[in-house]
Amino acid sequence: MSNYSYFYYYSLLKIENQMNAFSKTLLILLCQWFSLETLAQVVPYQPGAYYPGLANLRDFAADAPGFYIFNYSYFASSNGYFDRNGDEFTPTVVDGIPFDVPNPEVSGYINVPSVVYLSNFKLLGGNYQAMIQATYMHLDFDAVLVVGEPQPPLSGSVSGLGDLAVTPLGIAWSFNNTFDISFLYTAVMPTGRYDTEAEDNIGQGYWTHQFQAPAYVYFNDKATAIGIIPTLELNGRVTDVDAQIGNRFSLEYGVGQYVTEWLELELVGSSSWQISDDTGETIWWQGTPFYSRDQRHSVAAGIGVWPGVDWLNARVRYTTDYAARQSFKVNIFSFSFLFLPGQLKKQFTERTSSR
C-alpha cells in the first residue's frame, strides 16, 4: 500500500463578504488526500479568500457620505466536484489504489453583517471610506467514501465565526453622476478558528491582501448602471507550516436597471483564476490528481426593492456556477438588506419638526 492510504473528506465553509470592498469566499466542500503518517504536517486544500459574484452589483459604487449597514444571508449547496480538466470527478486510481466519492452532499447557511463609512474627507480628490465585516457560518455535509473498498459514510456539521475583513483604505471618485471609480484595499485577518491538525476549521489560517478598482458607467440619470470589478488577491503563508497559498485574480461585470423608482433588476457574471502556484513542503496536493490552478465561472440574477421608505433596501439573488476546474460547482440563494441610519434620522427629524 502507498503512504496515501486513506482518502478523507474535509469539510469547510468560509465567506469573506464583499460589499463595497469586503470580500467573500465560499468553499463548500474540500477533498483532502494525505498520508496518515504525516497528518500533523499537512494543510487543507485552500481556494483563496475571495469568492466573486456574490455581492449586489451596486454595492461597490460610490454614494453619498454616511454610514451604511449591510446584512447578507446565504443558503448554499453543492453536490458535484469538477477536476482539473473541468469534468465532473469520476473514479480514478492513484498509486494503485482506486478511489471515488459518489454523490457528495453539502449545504450551508452564512450570515454576514457589515458596516461601511463613506466620509466627506477628501483624499487624492476622492472621498475616503472604511469598512469592517464579520461572518457566521453553519455547514452540514454527507459523503460516501470509496478508497480501495467502500468506507463508512462521513457526515457532520461545523459552525462558528469566520475570519474578519477590514478595509482601512478606500477612495471613491464620482464624476457628474455618469462615472464612478474606487480604489479599495482590504485585509482578511486569520481570526476564525484554524488548526492544521483539526477537521472543523472555519478560518483560512493566513492573511490575505486584496486590491480592487470597481468602476461604473451610468445612463438615464443613473437608472442604468454598467459595472466592472477587478480584484487582485495576494495570499500569505499558512500559520505554523511551510505552505504559501497561490494568488488569484477575479473579474466581475454586469448591468443593473431600475424599471421603476423602487424596483431594480440586475444580471452579473464573474470569473476567478489562480495566477500563481501553491508552494511549500506541506502542500500535499502537488503531484496528485487534485493539483492544478483552479478557476470558477458564475452567473447571477437579482431583484432589489425600496419598500416605501428611503432608509431600507431589500434584495434577493440567485448565483450558480456554470464552469469550474479543481473545484465544486456551487448554487447560492441569498437575500440582503441595506440599512441607511442617516435617512431614518432625516425622516424622523422631518416628521417631528412638522408637528
Image (cartoon, rainbow, N blue to C red):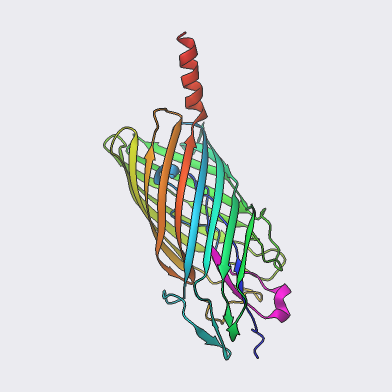
- In the displayed structure, 271 sits above or below 242; it is above
Q: In x, y percent, where is residue 313?
A: 43, 36
Instruction: Using the image as rendered, state which of residue 291 and residue 83 is in the foreground.
Output: 83
Asked if residue 268 lies in the magenta stretch, the reply is: no
Q: In x, y percent, where is residue 324?
A: 43, 68
The structure residue drawn at horizontal position 67% and vertical position 66%, both measured from the top left corner, is 199
| Image: magenta residue range | 28-45
Q: In x, y percent, where is residue 60?
A: 44, 44
Query: Outermost residue toward the left?
Result: 220
The structure residue drawn at horizontal position 49% and vertical position 45%, both measured from the top left corner, is 19
The structure residue drawn at horizontal position 53% and vertical position 63%, both measured from the top left corner, is 106
Instruction: Using the image as rendered, state which of residue 333 and residue 122 is in the foreground.
Output: 333
Instruction: Using the image as rendered, state which of residue 21 and residue 267 is in the foreground.
Output: 267
Q: Is residue 218 visible?
A: yes
Q: In x, y percent, where is residue 99?
A: 55, 83
Q: Quadrant of the N terminus?
A: bottom right
- Counting every numbered tag in the picture gives 0
- In the displayed structure, 4 sits above or below 26; it is below
For this view, does 306 lie left or right of residue 184?
left
Asked if residue 40 lies in the magenta stretch, the reply is: yes
For this view, does 195 lie left or right of residue 132?
right
- In the displayed structure, 39 sits above or below 133; it is below
Query: Outermost residue toward the top?
Result: 355
Q: Is residue 16 visible?
A: no
The structure residue drawn at horizontal position 49% and vertical position 41%, both measured from the top left corner, is 171
